[in-house]
Amino acid sequence: MTSSIGSIDLTDIKWWTSDPYPVLRQLRETDPVHWHTPGPDSFTHRHPFWALTRHSDVVYVSRHPELFCSGEGHLTETLQAALTDYDTFAMLGADNPYHALLRGHVSSAFTARMVIRAESVIRDQVSALFDALAPRKHEEIDFVREVSAVVPIQVIGDVLGVPPEDFPLIAEWTDALMESDDFVIDMETNTVSSAKGTAALGEMFDYLERMQRIREDNPKDDLVSRLMNAEIDGEKLSWRQQRECFFVLVLAGNDTTRNTASAGAHALFENPDQRADLAADYSLMRSAVEEMLRWGTVVTHFRRTATEDTEIGGKKIKKGEWVAMFYSAANRDPEVFDNPDSFDIRRTPNDHLAFGGGGPHFCLGAPLARLELRIIVEELLRRYPNYEVTGDTPYTFSSLFHGIKSMPVVLDPR
Amino acid sequence: MKAEQTLMSLRVSVDDDFCISAMQCSATAPEVFGHDEDGVVTVLDPQPPVESYEAVRHAARICPAAAIRTIEA
């Protein structure tokens, strides 16, 4: 598939639901720092931006927050503006020093040491999940809904303090916010809104308020309680700051791991020799998880804003211009990855950017995500090493989240 | 001369309770930072040679968990 560079529209959501990699490669080869203007189909995007598709440029921008800030937004969708009332992006859309202070209150729950302690709990949850599926192991199930989506919600729900009976609510909010299929453009303000997404946010914040009322008198050992008592510069976090953190954790701690687990399970099915090798030798698991992260690249891009006139790869970038870092393209850059379009569980080193390109916004959930993915694949292959994907695997309708929406699987084909 | 050497010395430590295994330090200054098998940061050389100073300072700056401390005296 080839097209002229000018006609490439990275904001066309429909395009992301098919194979985006040939066009991303073409862009990286022909115009790696590309001035992208909204195309006729990019109804969620009303603002031009620089599209970066090289690994080295994504790393450079990520690690120079003084030149490329997050405080003016981290999305390319103009949807963001329509959600101003909710302004829900917490530390993702903030710069240091405030960013580090806010993030510090959250990240204490996600350090490598905290995560190690969670391993046995998560393994018990995943084991119980697969055991419960055993009676239906010869039937077709939706792997996304029954496996990939379940585990991360259990884990992040426990961290936040959401009781298990309310986990289905988290799933509902996530589904509504991930899939952008009911956008309405307001031509006057040039912004886009989604009734479904707005309603889900409202429900989520009402829910958080109820959680907080319960904890006012009886604080618990969970992140919602901790955020209620957290301070920045001697002041308690505002309601708005708390709900932003809650929102970010519910979504980022959830759909990303879900989509990587689905992409990984799909890739292993498509590479049966590697799947058999992995099932026989769990010492390959760590590199296999890294390759699943690279292969899935479930967050396609984030953006920064230039804080001064500068340069990337010889192109002049003006102060205030938007810069979008396409992790999806960087993770297939042949300068860094041999045979980038091959799935290889032994790939070492694997300097993928699935958690971001480094710098202050590097995914704070990385150790937890790696652990969850490792346990899911270990327990899956221990029980059902010959699972089959039995039908189509459509992608979520989004240019930000690249995820398999549903995946029919028979765990134990007869 | 001795005073100048003292001025130049850099000590590095980490608060490994903050580490989120981003692995940026070990990629930036592999001679100074490592990780144990759980991915938690370790300091391989708490008093690194002068030629590593710049990399160590950079690693401390980009650590997303702000887990690296440098003392220059």
Image: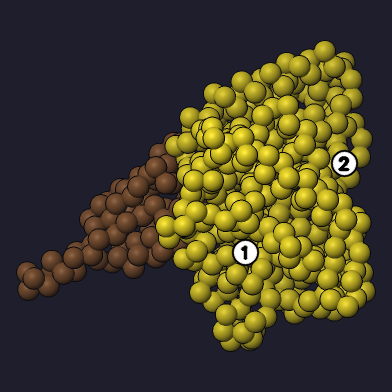
Chain colours: A yellow, B brown
Could you tell whether A279 is left or right of A194 in the image?
left
Could you tell whether A374 is left or right of A4 in the image?
left
| Residue A146 place in picture, x, y as percent | 80, 29
In which quarter of the view is residue A119 placed? top right
Find disc 1 in the rendering and name its residue: A93
Q: Which mark is residue B50?
A: none
Q: Which numbered disc flags the more N-terminal residue, 2 or 1? A: 1
In which quarter of the view is residue A85 placed? bottom right
Q: Toward the viewer: A109 or A37?
A: A109
In which quarter of the view is residue B30 placed? bottom left
Please tell me which residue is depicted at 33% across the width and 54% down the height of the picture. B32
Which structural element holds mark 1?
Answer: helix
Q: Toward the viewer: A268 or A207?
A: A207
Q: Toward the viewer: A26 or A408?
A: A408
Quadrant the C terminus of chain A occupies: top right
Q: Toward the viewer: A21 or A179?
A: A179
Q: Report the amino acid beneath label 1.
A: Gly
Please tell me which residue is depicted at 53% across the width and 70% down the height of the picture. A65
| Residue A343 place in picture, x, y as percent | 71, 45
Find disc 2 in the rendering and name its residue: A393
Disc 2: CA contacts within 10 A as few (<14), some (14-19) or many (>=20)? some
Q: Above or below — where is A357 with respect to A48?
A: above
Report whether residue A256 is seen. Answer: no
